[in-house]
Image (cartoon, rainbow, N blue to C red):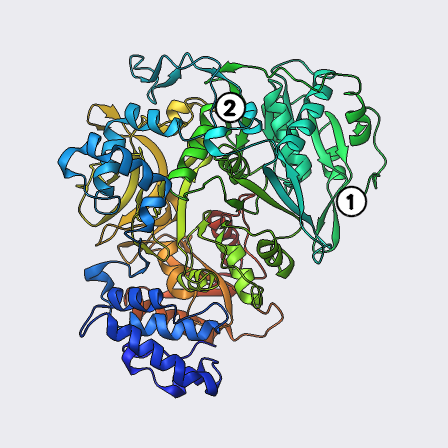
Amino acid sequence: MAARARGSVREIQPVDVGDAGLAAAEAGAFLAALRSAAAAAGPGAAGDAVWAAVAAAGVLRPEHPHALHQLVYYSVYAGWDRAARGPPPYWFPSPIDCKQTNLGRLMEENGPKLLGSSYKDPISSFNHFYRFSVENQEVYWSMVLKQLAVKFQQEPKAILSTSDRSNKGGTWLQGAVLNIAECCLLPCPSLKRTDDSTAIIWRDEGLDDHPVNRMSLKELRSQVITVANALDTMFQKGDRIAIDMPMTCDAVIIYLAIVLGGFVVVSIADSFAPQEIGTRMAVSKAKAIFTQDFIIRGGKKVPLYSRVVQGTSSKAVVIPATGGYLGVTLRNGDVSWKDFLSRAAGRSSIYSAAYQSADAITNILFSSGTTGEPKAIPWTQLAPIRCAADTWAHLDVQPQDIGCWPTNLGWVMGPIILYSCFLNGATLALYHGSPLGRDFCKFVQDAGVTVLGSVPSLVKSWKAGNYAKGLDWTKIRVLGTTGEASDIDDNLWLTSRTSYKPIVECCGGTELASSYIQGSLLQPQAFGAFSGASMSTGFVILDEQGTPYPDDVPCAGEVGLFPLYFGATNWLLNADHNKVYFDGMPIYKGRQLRRHGDIVQRTVGGYYIVQGRADDTMNLGGIKTSSVEIERVCNRADEGLLETAAVSIKPAGGGPEHLAILAVLKDRSAQYDVNLLKSKFQRAIQKNLNPLFKVSYVKIVPEFPRTASNKLLRRVLRDQLKQELSNHSKL
């Protein structure tokens, strides 16, 4: 349980430190170090200056109890006025280290030439350089392309052409010819990548005390060529081939082989039911599917091949989850992994990659829709470049890094982390098993991960089980998070395990191949907030009439993206792209804005907070608010809560919307008084959000429905509650 925060850090007493779990023998030295660090910030220093001094002094260590980190952080910021100053920052860029970041180096080399005498240094000139990247995309992208392992067979005639006005997103890298998978597999002197460089580090679940496994670039390339040769014996160039399996080494090899050979990957998440598999196979017109007999998760064998068989009649290539032999009997026409690979026997170990234009399709991904047909989103060869460029600029992925982001090739983060590592010369770290527990956290330590990505629900699991206890995560230098709104206290726990490294918040979409807003290592970072737009990305926030707010005004509304966006889609396989993303959007500076669907708040201080999708806003007593705002407050209303979901219900007979809050407990077997929980939620909302908001209904549930990419499905909860409450007339 968290120790009670004091009115300021200077008021913390030995008893508070003891209550927070620190041994009495250590309390005196800790308090002395804390007070010394706080004093270094100067008399009367604001909370951000005090926190910066405390963090820089290393007073708080990863092995300290989380309650102690809470005590200090919340005491430092006890008097912080968010309304007047915006979210409190917890991480600050170093004037020295900033020049060693990817973007900092680029700015130091080119800033004086591009920005003139206004250029000072990467931190103070960051906003100026960001605006330059939006207004001069050709210049920005020509510089960034040189930083990546992108090798053209034919150089582009132009970075960007806007002559075709029917193509609202512009024409990018016109005339360029390449194979983006080959770019991932070749040595790259500029990134110090050789055949002997480690391409992949991995470990199988259950072997957690064994050394990690390593695969060199040469070994990876050889295995990819074997699979590409086997594919050539079965398929025609351009055929669409699905992958529905965990993100293992084999899955990555298959993915790269499909693209190297000039085929198209169809991404299907391994969590899908048979009907959803079938829908995606049919929409994409996939000729075959790679899958596993089972999925190994938490020591359990979860059937996968049987779901694929129920979902599609297309040919399946089936890989054993463990060992060399399949644990299932194959239907007629399906092929074992062993027999598939034998088709490459006798073929050349030198493979001619399929070179195509930059706008050739390499991957079909799907939106997270669960009603109706999910949008089929085609990725061209531009999308992987965008993935790598954004992680180069914002997560600062460098050649010596080891990147790990537990995910799946059926979700957008799968291809993003794959390309982000390989096109930046970094090593990809894969854990073949569940990422929820201690074993995964130990893999992060043993693999020497330096860039760790997550989603908020994963962090909740790690924190709830205290799974990083006793582990050394200090090699991590950058953390990333995406998928849904972050919890402030969960992120405090996460960064404290790494000696307070920055957490880069990312928010984007499959159709953008990237994030439109992100944190940056050249700006101070605040928990649960984005410090700005992605490099080269422009957007405005629209009021209810569709009029953009001025760029420097705190506000909230639907975001409208500038349409010239490197890597974004310009068509959909099964929907009208123009209707989905542009119809009804206003014209801004001569171009129609692109719809994304997020409600975004720009705070005092220039941070951004995503308040959910446009359809997750609610009207409570005539006041518009978002589910995310209410959930942030309710998540901290009781120590026993794992997470909450806020939805509004419109009564059948009309009238104002009612606020309903659903809760998942840390201990699913615990008995909770729902009325007591309701009163706690009510007090928390009245104190921290709005005294006029009334909680009408509270329900405890075992878990929340989520998309394959782990986004909370409030719409499904809303529909379920509406049906339940209409049956019981509880509202």
Asked if 69 appears above or below 171 in the picture, the reply is below
Residue 333, picture quadrant: top right
Residue 649, picture quadrant: bottom left
Please tell me how crowded label 2 is: few (under 14), some (14-19), or many (20+) other residues with Cα within 10 Å: few
Give the amino acid type for the residue marked by disc 2 in the picture: Asn
Asked whether 495 or 628 is in front, the reply is 495
The residue depicted at 81 percent of the width and 43 percent of the height is 323
**On the rendered image, what quadrant is the C terminus found in?**
bottom left
Residue 208, given in percent of the width and then of the height, sits at 69, 56
Q: Is residue 36 something one can see in this rendering?
A: yes
Please tell me how crowded label 1 is: few (under 14), some (14-19), or many (20+) other residues with Cα within 10 Å: some
Q: Is residue 724 left or right of residue 286?
A: left
Does the residue at mark 2 contact the one at mark 1 (Cβ under 8 Å)? no
Q: Is residue 679 left or right of residue 545?
A: right
Residue 219, picture quadrant: top right
* Residue 590 marker: none
The residue depicted at 62 percent of the width and 61 percent of the height is 438
Asked if 405 appears above or below 338 in the picture, the reply is below
Residue 88, given in percent of the width and then of the height, sits at 29, 61
Asked whether 629 or 97 is in front, the reply is 97
Asked if 682 appears above or below 204 in the picture, the reply is below
Residue 276, given in percent of the width and then of the height, sits at 62, 36
Give the amino acid type for the residue marked by disc 1 in the picture: Thr
* Residue 322 marker: 1
* Residue 574 marker: 2
3D distance between C-alphas at marks 2 and 1: 37 Å
Q: Residue furthest left?
A: 117
Of mark 2 and mark 1, the one earlier in the sequence is 1
Asked whether 289 or 175 is in front, the reply is 175
